[in-house]
Amino acid sequence: MKIALIGYGKMGKAIEEMAVAKGHEIVLKIDVNNAHEFTQSNIQKANVAIEFTGPHSAFDNISKCIEWGVPVISGSTGWLEKWDSITALCNQHQGCLVYSSNYSIGVNLFFEINQQLALLMEPYQDYDVSMTELHHTEKKDAPSGTAISLAEQILKKISRKNKWVNTASTTPSDLVIHSERIDPAPGTHTISYTSPIDRIDIIHTAHTRKGFASGAVLAAEFANKKKGIFTMKQVLGL
């Protein structure tokens, strides 16, 4: 399979290493230094594009891939206020998009655990739920996209919480997400249920970027020649 990498930072390089090890070919690598090479003719040399950039460029990058008929895997966060526009564009062009805030297989299993625990905790109002996410200092968005995904899962199950906030709050209906940026830290997400008598924590800690890269390549293999919008849940068959 021929892959275009849109975004060639640490994550892009980790994806390249994983993809090449699995026998795939990287036919295009785009970063800030050669953005002018992100053209229709270049991107169409690939069977699939993997896009890991930032919140300000992701929407345009994904849109171009869809318009130019190349399935795209995106792990960029901080742009989802434009999700409806991307959905409409994908439907219009019969394109393919796989989107996840986190491509780690372990994190996606953690998503499933999070939903089940929230469902179990819903009747027990003595337990207050909060979250902490820890990442490296180069991460541009806070809270992380993974933390937001986890928080939105909780909000669907815990009726006493109305919204997530990324600041200290004494409002009982707020789900507080604490964000910390420390090097080196590929990513840790902790969900805590605290009562006057005890506390329950579930934690996912990434040791390296290889888990994210492996999942992104798996998603690219899944997306090749498909049409529609998918998540890692479909990729993993969960």
Image (cartoon, rainbow, N blue to C red):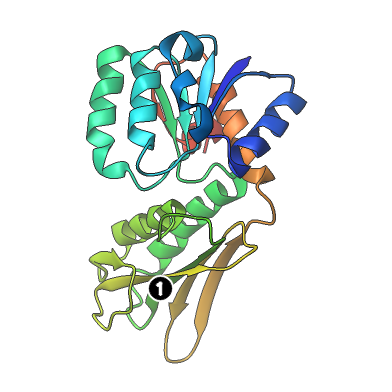
Pick the front one: 206 or 36:
36
Identified at 30% across, 56% down, the residue is 156
Work out whether 163 lies above or below 231: below
Identified at 55% across, 67% down, the residue is 202
User: Where, by quadrant of the figure, is residue 66 drawn?
Assistant: top left
In this rendering, does residue 214 appear at all? no
Q: Position of residue 168 (x, y in %)?
A: 33, 79
Check the image and name the residue furthest to the right. 21
Q: Residues within 10 Å of mark 1 (few under 14, many from 20)?
A: some
Pick the front one: 206 or 136:
136
Q: Position of residue 121 (x, y in %)?
A: 40, 70
Identified at 25% across, 38% down, the residue is 82
Pick the front one: 238 or 46:
46
- Helix, strand or loop status at disc 1: strand
Identified at 52% across, 18% down, the residue is 48
Left or right: where 97 falls relative to 81: right
Residue bearing mark 1: 130
Location of the N terminus by quadrant is top right
